Image (tube, helix red, strand yellow):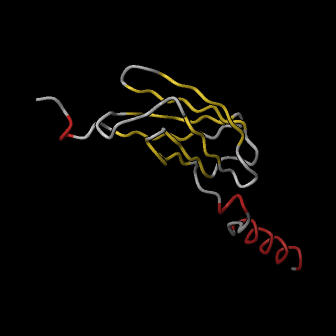
Amino acid sequence: MRRALLATVLTAATAIPTTGAAAASSPPTLRLAGLHPLVLRGADFRTRERVRIVVDTSTQRFVRRTTATAAGAFTVSFGSVVMSRCEGVSAYAVGARGSVAAVKQAQLPECAPE
């Protein structure tokens, strides 16, 4: 009887989701933080993960490398890249331990040539 009760309790305990960092973690994100110069911010990457950030404009590609903080965040500036609000840009960040995030800003419709 005790073994059956113990087995039931152990089965129920493994079915309860954990409340630790693994359950609370969000997928990595990447966002535009500025256009003059171009600045990107990453969040929810793995702790101290090496991250490669690639920015593609309509004419060029730029690459930077950084390390996420203990909180999994980073800010990277592409000082030589100045974007206008009418220029489209896409960027992605890939971490050495599997974190991936991307962001895209399309050219605004009012900026498109007629």
Residue shown at the point (89%, 79%) measured from the top left = 2
Q: Residue furthest top?
A: 59
Which quarter of the rendering shows the C terminus?
top left
Give left or right: position of 3 versus 11: right
Q: How many marks?
A: 0
Above or below, 48 against 9 in this view is above
Q: Nearer the viewer, residue 7 or 46?
A: 46
Q: Residue 1 lies in what quarter of the image? A: bottom right
Q: Residue furthest right?
A: 2
Above or below, 17 against 34 in this view is below
> At which x and y percent is residue 64?
61, 30
Residue shown at the point (79%, 75%) measured from the top left = 9
Q: Residue 8 lies in what quarter of the image? A: bottom right
Residue shown at the point (70%, 58%) measured from the top left = 22
> At which x and y percent is residue 100?
58, 39
> At which x and y percent is residue 34?
46, 46
Residue shown at the point (73%, 71%) measured from the top left = 12
> At which x and y percent is residue 83?
39, 35
Give left or right: position of 16 versus 101: right
Give left or right: position of 59 versus 17: left
Q: Nearer the viewer, residue 24 or 11?
A: 24
